[in-house]
Image (tube, grey):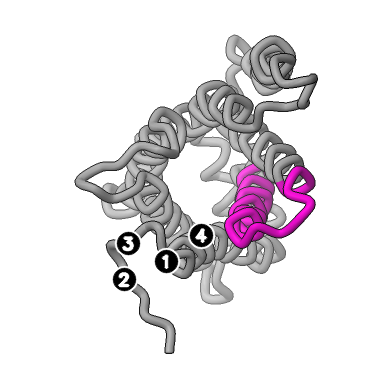
Amino acid sequence: MINIDLFDWDNIYVKLAVYLLYGTSFIVMFLVMALWKHRMSHIELLADFKYLAIFALLHGLTEYIEMFRIIGLEPSWIFDLIKLLLATSSFTALLAFGVNVVSAGVEEYRWLRGMPFGALWMYVWMLIFIGIDFTNNNAGINYTVAETAQRYTLGFLGALISAYSFFDISTKIKIIVGEKEQRRFIYVALCFALYTVFGGILDSDVRILGIPVVVYRTLTAVLITLSIIEVFQLFKLKGSPGMKKTDDFYFLHKELK
């Protein structure tokens, strides 16, 4: 019988359980957005949410790959490389989501849409100069350094701007559909603000109250998924067959601009 001590982070089963929940949370978020897409394919407001869905899928897979690393499957460098590529792509998609939402309908902010490419390019150069290990017989990529640089560039910016984008939407939603519905977007914004701290600032080795930061990231991922479901339920409700006006979403989008 397997004995799992929840406070023993050295227990491999505890680590696997945490990363399984972490990855599954984002996979569920992706599936929810994908399954509801056909109900809201005509809503311009949600057009940029495809980047958020891509982030959820790729980041969920990233955490699943981490489970293979924990188990110690060989060759380990393959899983290291796959995780690095998946995480980089997921954070780039998250950043693209945030800047697209913030710049939507505002001509002065359209230059922001190039930020994901700039941040990605900056990360690549950081990887070249500080992530390549030439000190150990040209061993190749130093994945610890690469992941840290990735988190402080793409991860931090993506989560921070996404948090701001949901706060921005919430203020406009309040004018149109009321304060109650506004809270749904505020909850998402707060969750991404937490993810900015746990996922974009704090290193993976950090412990808070003796608990590894990845546990807090996992809980935040669960909260993000639940809050996103709440947001989509708002559109599901307004777009139900009982609605008399099917173009309410167009009106909503125009007002948000």
Query: Element at badge 3?
Result: loop
Question: Viewer-proximal residue, 66 or 168?
Answer: 66
**What secondary structure characterizes most of the magenta part?**
helix
The residue labelled by disc 1 is 14
Residue 78 visible in the shown view: yes
Q: Position of residue 214 (x, y in %)?
A: 41, 48
- Residue positioned most to the bottom: 1
Q: Position of residue 87 (x, y in %)?
A: 65, 40
For the residue carrying disc 2, how many other residues have a C-alpha within 10 Å: few (<14), some (14-19), or many (20+)? few
Identified by mark 1, the residue type is Val
Q: Amino acid at mark 4?
A: Tyr
| Contact between labelled residues 3 and 2, with CB atoms less than 8 Å apart | yes
- Nearer to us: label 3 or label 1: 3
Residue topped by disc 4: 19
Q: Which residue is mark 2?
A: 5
In this rendering, would 202 be left or right of 144? left
- Give the magenta part as a residue range: 51-79
Residue position for label 3: 8
Q: Is residue 5 magenta?
A: no
Q: In this image, 161 relative to 96: left or right?
A: left
- Extreme residue in the front direction: 137
Q: Are marks 4 and 3 in contact (CB under 8 Å)?
A: no
Q: Give yes or no for contact between labels 3 and 1 (Cβ–Cβ under 8 Å).
A: yes
Residues under numbered marks 2 and 4 in contact, where contact means CB atoms less than 8 Å apart = no
SS type, badge 4: helix
What is the quadrant of residue 100 in the picture?
Answer: top right
Residue lying at 61% horizontally and 53% vertically, measured from the top left = 66
- The residue drawn where x is 32% and y is 62% is 8
